[in-house]
Image: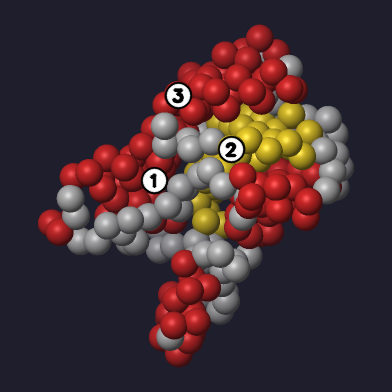
Amino acid sequence: MDLQLQDKNVLITGGSKGIGKAIARVFVSEGANVGIAARDIQALESAKAELGGKVAVYSADVAKSEERKELIQSFVSEHKTVDVLINNAGGSSGGAATETEMDVFYQAMELNYFSAVHLSKLAIEHMKRAGKGAIINITSVFGRESGGKVTYNNAKSALISYTKALADEVIADGIRVNSIAPGSILHETGNWKKRFEKDPEKIRAFVKREIPAGRFGTPEEIANVAAFLASDKASWIVGASINVDGGQSRMNF
């Protein structure tokens, strides 16, 4: 299917590895102009060499407000506008709610929630001028239901809620906002890979017990949904939170 993403200007946070890099690869294959952002410039340059195509790299810590502003300014300076923003950067930390320091809660919200809120607001300024745009927030099935580390669960729940509120607000301007809620995804730099290497039997039991499809998901399976949502083929999908999880989540919707 031709998603008609040729020459679209796409910015992806957390784009140097895992799901973010897989998303970048799909957009590159569609002929888009792709920008990937992450903290580690060496990882970014390595990803750029691997991806080929029209890829620009931006070293930025999106947990910091000023660096978020600089990121959008740099991207727009190079590409004139932002057609698609993928808020993918994130991470989990802490432990039980009663044992996790407040600083860890604040850090989790800054990285997983406020970064997406702020970058979306900055990108929308440019999208409104163009009269179109798409924003996709990568959340988690554990933003839709209980599970995972509490700091991560809280932040991703907030992001799903923000997605719907923002989507309803800006669709009249031609801007669509949606979120993807991945289940457990296996990739070389992810936590599931480390857990599997540490205790393969335990992880195999987890997969059998928790994932009806009987395997982990792949970054490419998230990336394909992201590309579809960014395209005009998804023109009537607004404010949705889409599970991509092999049946892992337990919700009825």
Q: Residue furthest left?
A: 98
Write down the residue under mark 3.
Answer: 66
Splitting the image into 4 quarters, where does residue 216 fall? Answer: bottom right
Give the residue displayed 57% in from the left and 14% down from the top: 125
Write down the residue under mark 2.
Answer: 59
As helix, strand or loop, the secondary structure at mark 2 comes to: strand
Give the residue displayed 69% in from the left and 18% down from the top: 77
Find residue 247 and report its horizontal and vertical position in percent: 52, 66
Does the CB distance between marks 3 and 1 fall below 8 Å? no
As helix, strand or loop, the secondary structure at mark 3 comes to: helix
- Residue 61 appearing in the image: yes
Write down the residue under mark 1.
Answer: 156
Q: Is residue 228 left or right of residue 90?
A: right
Three-letter amino acid code of the residue under disc 3: Glu
As helix, strand or loop, the secondary structure at mark 1 comes to: helix
Q: Whole-Å distance between the Cαs marked 3 and 2?
A: 13 Å
Q: Nearer the viewer, mark 3 or mark 1?
A: 3
Give the residue displayed 71% in from the left and 53% down from the top: 46
Q: Is residue 226 left or right of residue 232?
A: left
Give the residue displayed 64% in from the left and 23% down from the top: 74
Q: Residues within 10 Å of mark 3 (few under 14, many from 20)?
A: few
Q: Nearer the viewer, residue 18 or 247?
A: 18
Q: Is residue 103 left or right of residue 108?
A: left
How many numbered callouts?
3
- Residue 171 appearing in the image: no
Q: Whole-Å distance between the Cαs marked 1 and 2?
A: 24 Å
Q: Earlier in the sequence, mark 3 or mark 2?
A: 2
Q: Residues within 10 Å of mark 1 (few under 14, many from 20)?
A: many
Q: Residues within 10 Å of mark 2 (few under 14, many from 20)?
A: some
Splitting the image into 4 quarters, where does residue 177 fall? Answer: top right
